[in-house]
Amino acid sequence: MAIRIKTPEQIDGIRKSSRLAAECLKYLEQFVVAGNTTAFLDQKAAEFMKEHGAISATRGYNGFTGHICTSPNDVVCHGIPGPYTLKDGDILNIDCTTVLNGYYGDTCKMYTVGEVSEEAKKLMDVTRECLRIGMKECYPGNRFGNIGYAIAQHAHQHGYGVVYEFCGHGVGVKFHEDPEVSHIAQKNTGKRMRPGMIFTIEPMINTGKARCKIDKIDGWTARTIDGGLSAQYEHTILITDNGCEALTDVYGDF
């Protein structure tokens, strides 16, 4: 299928939703402390979205029950908020997708609870850098495969596994659109980027093997197959006439 080129009106709506998603993650920082449950974080996210006239894209999506995804430690992605209680030393990914006036904004980031291990710090730093490196490949005329090629090269230099079972995706008018944006790919493969395309880059990097296992009970929670740590950062990216704009990078972190 063809990759949707967004109109100026759509870009404006997606930018506003993306900003709100980023602001929601910032708001949740104060609650990511030992003793709070991931269900509590979900409640605070739901309240924030409602107060700002938005709803969650994940709530009710194919039966998913959370307003956000909460993925601690060895959970790669799609962790369902629940009774898990945060403790010192945890790392936590929160993935937030807002729907504001019919437009979608999708972003995620890592949080630390108390003092975390050097292993965890390094993993998060490298994963963050993987996102930055992927974003440098976003400009008109470049091929989508070069995003994954660059990300995987960097992660592998540090001995990490790059998750290939989940990927980035087009976003904005729908939750998931074309194209799929792989985080490990062959160089100079895939379709070419054009101004007006909007998609996510969201590398999931593991300290060990790249493979995941899905929880057989909830059907959603994806964990590292070897129990190692996993980290993820994500931005919604707009291809511009001469480069790209990270619509969810509200606080200039990238």
Image: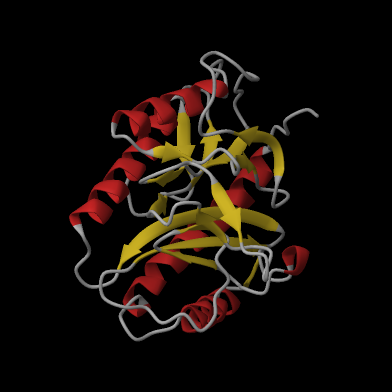
Q: Position of residue 16 (x, y in %)?
A: 55, 56
Residue 95 vs 115, above or below: the answer is above
Q: Residue at x 73, y 70 (%)?
A: 60
Relative horizontal placement of residue 207, taking residue 193 as reference (left or right): left
Left or right of 239? Residue 55 is right
Image x and y of residue 137, in percent: 45, 24
Q: Nearer the viewer, residue 92 or 137?
A: 92
Q: As drawn, which residue projects farthest toward the front?
A: 226
Which quadrant holds residue 220?
bottom right
Query: Between 176 and 189, which is closer to the camera in this rendering?
Result: 189
- Quarter of the image for the C terminus: give it: top left
Q: Is residue 10 visible?
A: yes
Residue 207 at what x, y percent from top left?
Answer: 35, 46
Image point (51%, 75%), residue name: 45
- Check the picture and name the quadrant holding the N terminus: top right
Q: Is residue 64 left or right of residue 18?
A: right
Task: Reply above or below: 26 against 121.
Answer: below
Residue 55, how many percent across, how many down? 65, 70
